[in-house]
Image (tube, helix red, strand yellow):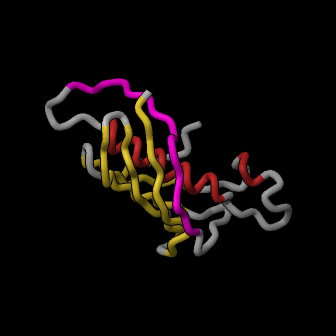
Amino acid sequence: MRLLDEVVEVRPGASAIARRTTRAGDFYFQGHFPGQPIVPAVILVELIAQAGGLAVAAPAPGAPALSIRMHVAALGPFKFPGSATAGDVLEARARVVGTVGALHKIEGDVTAGGRVVAAGAVTLARV
């Protein structure tokens, strides 16, 4: 599932910033929670993972683009100091902080209206 709507900035191998505007009809609001839709924490984590994947997979200037598949290999720690609801613009910022072989450690955060709603680390593995 692709969650990102807009790629704001990519620094190949280093960082990425991307956005998603939440909509009342988004699948993850079904049952989370009736009458008070809140973006689930796992979606916020996935936004960081997807932005981090962009940073890892983006080709260096002048280099050919490659098709790189990745999956989440490890999570955490994460904190969720706020919440996001339908209509919020979520901005995911991801930084590549380490690479060992096919593993890439990403640290990042997600903000909604300038408020941090998630922050933590995810490790991506190239498949």
Residue 71 coordinates in the image, percent (x, y): 50, 36
Question: Which of 77 and 7 lies nearest the eye of the viewer?
Answer: 77
Q: How many marks?
A: 0
Quarter of the image where the N terminus is located: top right
Q: What residue do we see at 42% from left, 60% from top?
A: 108
Residue 76 falls inside the magenta stretch: yes
Side of 105 relative to 34 (left or right) = left
Residue 92 falls inside the magenta stretch: no
Question: Which of 83 and 96 lies nearest the eye of the viewer?
Answer: 96
Q: Is residue 67 above or below residue 77?
A: above
Residue with the most extreme left position:
62
Residue 99 coordinates in the image, percent (x, y): 30, 44
Side of 43 relative to 77 (left or right) = right
Q: Quadrant of residue 127?
A: top left
Residue 91 coordinates in the image, percent (x, y): 46, 60
Q: What residue do we see at 46% from left, 63% from top?
A: 109
Question: Which of 3 and 87 lies nearest the eye of the viewer?
Answer: 3
Question: Which of 55 and 6 lies nearest the eye of the viewer?
Answer: 55
Numbered range of the magenta stretch: 64-79
Side of 82 relative to 19 (left or right) = right
Q: Is residue 53 above or below residue 87?
A: above
Q: What residue do we see at 38% from left, 28% from top?
A: 68
Magenta residues: mostly which secondary structure? strand
Q: Is residue 74 above or below residue 112?
A: above
Q: What residue do we see at 54% from left, 39% from top?
A: 2
Residue 113 coordinates in the image, percent (x, y): 51, 72
